[in-house]
Amino acid sequence: MKWLLALVCTLACVNAPLAQPADSTRFDPTDHYEVYTGSGEPSDLNAIVSAMAGAHVVFLGEQHNDPTGHALELMLLEAAHRQYGSSREVILGMEMFERDVQPVLDEYLSGHIREQDFLKASRPWSNYEADYRPLIEYAKENGLDVVATNAPSRYASLARRRGLVVLDSLESSWNWLPHAMPMTGISDQVAPPSPEYEARFRAEMDEMGAHEPMPGMPSADAMLVAQNLRDATMAFAIGFPFSEKLVLHINGSFHSADGLGIPEHRARFSSVETMLIITMLPVDDIHTAPEPSNDDFIIMTDKGLISE
């Protein structure tokens, strides 16, 4: 009978509306987003949560200064924990923390160190307080693991300046970058970016004027090396295996949109798992359907709420 009760509970949860923020001081994004499938059909957050049932890793691609996207991330984390937390371990992965601060993050989540000491040692982003602290505090309060996934900036900078192969002889980097045992070299574990991803990256750089760098500024080629290292590191840091776990990974949308970037590296590291790709896209009109893409869901958010 236990399986029948579990099935009834699961079906009830799937059809239940996603809870809205109960805290009056918390931003309610209700009127500031619309959800679409990757093919451009209208959808909703409940469909996203239901789709998580068949996923091992969920990529939530954001714009880092988008308040609606941040509010939705917290709602989706809460919903995933409510719906799947009794049967699967729900884990939060974050680009916003570099891998070498994982011990500090663990110490804070376990209650061993104060928040002020955590913040001094973990190098949080400048918008941590408003945008990412709610995720960390929810994880802390509910006993969820949080994985710091980004490559340490010093190694991304080194690879940008001197190439990826320089990391092969820097043993101090091996704990924090993609590696295999026995150690075969970082450069052997980080595959080159796909042609599609490289083309998209170069188009973005051209739009920003990086095709003609100022003296002393890195070229697009060099920046792509660092970008690809970050993507591969985030893919690797998510961990293995995840048959009984559900990972929600928060990252900039460029790193995962259209299934490029992190998901491509992830497929190389773990070919047997299922990924769910969600891209949050700030736009002027959230009611205009997006162009079809390889994303599973696209959430159009209110661009008017973003402060430059």
Image (spheres, rainbow, N blue to C red):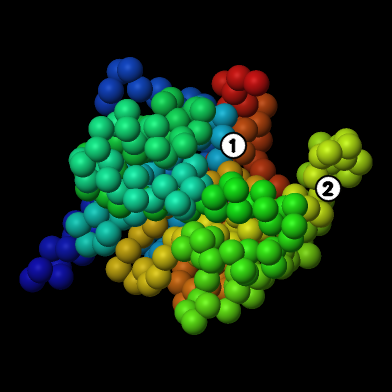
The answer to whether any part of residue 180 appears in the image is yes
Q: Residue 260: x and y, percent?
A: 65, 59
* Vertical position of residue 300 compared to residue 186: above or below: above
Q: Residue furthest bottom?
A: 182
- Can residue 203 be seen here? The reply is no
Secondary element at image label 1: loop
User: Label 2 is placed on what type of residue?
Assistant: Ser
Which is more toward the observer, 277 or 148? Answer: 148
Q: Residues within 10 Å of mark 2 (few under 14, many from 20)?
A: some
- Say which quarter of the image contains residue 242: bottom left
| Residue at 21% in and 41% down | 112
- What type is the residue that disc 1 sits on? Gln
Instruction: Tell which residue pokes out farthest to the left in this image.
Output: 1
The residue singled out by tag 2 in the image is 219
Residue 121 locus on image (x, y percent) = 40, 37
Q: Which residue is mark 1?
A: 63
Q: Specify the quadrant of the image occupied by residue 116.
A: top left
Frontmost residue, 106 versus 285: 106
Query: Residue at position x 88%, y 36% from top?
Result: 214
Secondary element under disc 2, as helix, strand or loop, is: loop
Label 1: how many residues lie within 10 Å, few (<14), some (14-19) or many (20+)? some
* Frontmost residue, 17 versus 67: 67
Q: Residue at x 32, y 64 (%)?
A: 245
- For the C terminus, the quadrant is top right
Quadrant placement of the N terminus = bottom left
Q: What is the x, y in percent for residue 87?
A: 22, 62
Q: Which mark is residue 282?
A: none
Separation of marks 1 and 2 at Cα, in angstroms:
24 Å
The answer to whether 244 appears left or right of 288 in the picture is: left
